[in-house]
């Protein structure tokens, strides 16, 4: 079985940042999946699940209402490991090209007085939200992005090197 791109990332070397995870062409249209890494995996604690849920709602709402980007957004959602989010956009832009969008999206969380769609009609787990903690994580990440704007490491995905056998099979140690 082929390893999926997100598992080929060296999670011991990745830092918070904005990374291109994969680029796909579907029916002559290019879409790009971005890894929006909020915490350092296996080093920092994962994002609190209720805060992550609130960040998902607030930032998805922000992205889908941004006049310059709303038609480009396909998906915004949390990673299963709770260390970041995936953003899928139409086209293929470098991570640096979406930096301002993501900085503004995370900064917008601090201005939120409520979590959009946090009702039983709109959300499958409407009681699992934590706006206060979402604001804390958003501020922390936005401040980090702002402080590291000129650091190329926040835009370069550290890939794991894998031995490939002569017949094209990838070797994975256990």
Image (cartoon, rainbow, N blue to C red):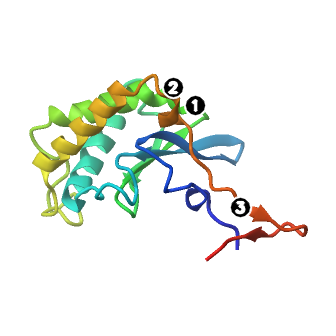
Res. 66 image quadrant? top left
Of helix, strand and loop, which one carries label 1?
loop
In the displayed structure, 67 sits above or below 25; it is above
Q: Residues within 10 Å of mark 1 (few under 14, many from 20)?
A: few
Residue 42, percent across and down? 39, 60
Q: Is residue 108 above or below residue 52?
A: above
Q: Earlier in the sequence, mark 3 or mark 1?
A: 1
Residue at image point 41% right, 46% down: 37
- Quickly name the residue at label 2: 97
Circles 1, 2 touching at the beta carbon (< 8 Å) = yes
Give the residue drawn at x 84%, y 68%. 165
Q: Which residue is mark 1?
A: 94
Quick one: label 2 or label 3, which is nearer the N terminus? 2
Asked if residue 30 lies left or right of residue 33, the reply is right
Residue corresponding to mark 3: 162
The percent coordinates of residue 77 (x first, y second) are: 38, 53
Query: Which residue appears at 52% of the width and 41% of the height?
Result: 19
Residue 56, image x, y percentages: 29, 50
* 3D distance between C-alphas at marks 1 and 2: 5 Å
Q: Secondary structure at mark 3?
A: loop
Q: Nearer the viewer, residue 119 or 47?
A: 47
The Cα atoms of the two marked residues, 3 and 1, are separated by 25 Å
């Amino acid at each position: 079985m082929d390893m999926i791109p997100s598992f080929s990332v060296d999670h011991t070397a990745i830092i918070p940042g904005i990374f291109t995870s994969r680029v796909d062409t579907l029916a002559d249209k290019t879409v790009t999946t971005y890894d929006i890494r909020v915490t350092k995996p296996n080093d920092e604690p994962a994002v609190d699940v209720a805060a992550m849920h609130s960040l998902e709602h607030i930032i998805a709402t922000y992205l889908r209402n941004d006049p310059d980007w709303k038609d480009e957004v396909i998906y915004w959602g949390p990673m299963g490991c709770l260390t970041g989010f995936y953003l899928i956009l139409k086209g293929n832009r470098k991570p640096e090209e979406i930096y301002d969008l993501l900085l503004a999206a995370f900064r917008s969380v601090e201005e939120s007085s409520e979590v959009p769609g946090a009702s039983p009609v709109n959300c499958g787990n409407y009681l699992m939200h934590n706006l206060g903690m979402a604001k804390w994580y958003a501020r922390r990440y936005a401040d980090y992005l702002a402080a590291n704007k000129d650091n190329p490491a926040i835009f370069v995905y550290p890939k794991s090197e894998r031995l490939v056998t002569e017949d094209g099979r990838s070797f994975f140690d256990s």
